[in-house]
Image: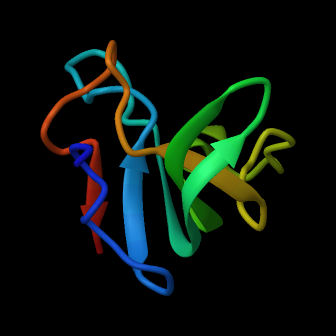
């Protein structure tokens, strides 16, 4: 079983970090509703959550300007495991 495979089910709300939080840089994460769970196929296959993003921390750092890079409203793929970026709180159920 993969590290974060059983954190959530379809319909649950999760928070997923892009990078491990650290001093000196803002946290980067998304919050979204799980719309699918399992194999994702792009140029390669891996297991992940697919979420409908309802909040993107990137939007907070832009201020009142519209953020053209916002993921809110988009489907975002969140892998169950990331060998280079893994840490205990990368994905949590909200």
> Residue 86, percent across and down?
25, 26
Q: Residue drawn 49% across and 81% down?
A: 10
Q: Is 61 placed left or right of 69 in the picture?
A: left
Q: Is residue 34 above or below residue 66?
A: below
Which residue is at the far left? 88
Q: Nearer the viewer, residue 40 or 58?
A: 40
Q: Is 55 placed left or right of 12 in the picture?
A: right
* Residue 57 shows up from this direction: no
Q: Is 16 placed left or right of 67 in the picture?
A: left
Q: Residue drawn 54% across and 76% down?
A: 33
Q: Residue drawn 58% across and 42% down?
A: 58
> Residue 54, percent across and down?
61, 71
Q: Residue drawn 59% across and 51% down?
A: 39
> Residue 16, percent across and down?
40, 50
* Residue 62 shows up from this direction: yes
Q: Nearer the viewer, residue 21 or 3?
A: 3
Q: Is 67 placed left or right of 85 in the picture?
A: right
């Amino acid at each position: 079983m993969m590290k974060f495979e059983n954190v959530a089910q379809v319909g649950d709300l999760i928070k997923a970090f892009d990078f491990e939080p650290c001093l000196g840089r803002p946290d980067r994460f998304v919050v979204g509703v799980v719309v699918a769970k399992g194999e994702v196929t792009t140029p390669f296959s891996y297991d992940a959550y697919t979420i409908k993003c309802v909040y993107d921390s990137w939007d907070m750092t832009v201020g009142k300007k519209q953020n053209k890079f916002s993921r809110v409203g988009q489907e975002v793929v969140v892998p169950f495991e990331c060998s280079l970026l893994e840490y205990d709180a990368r994905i949590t159920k909200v």
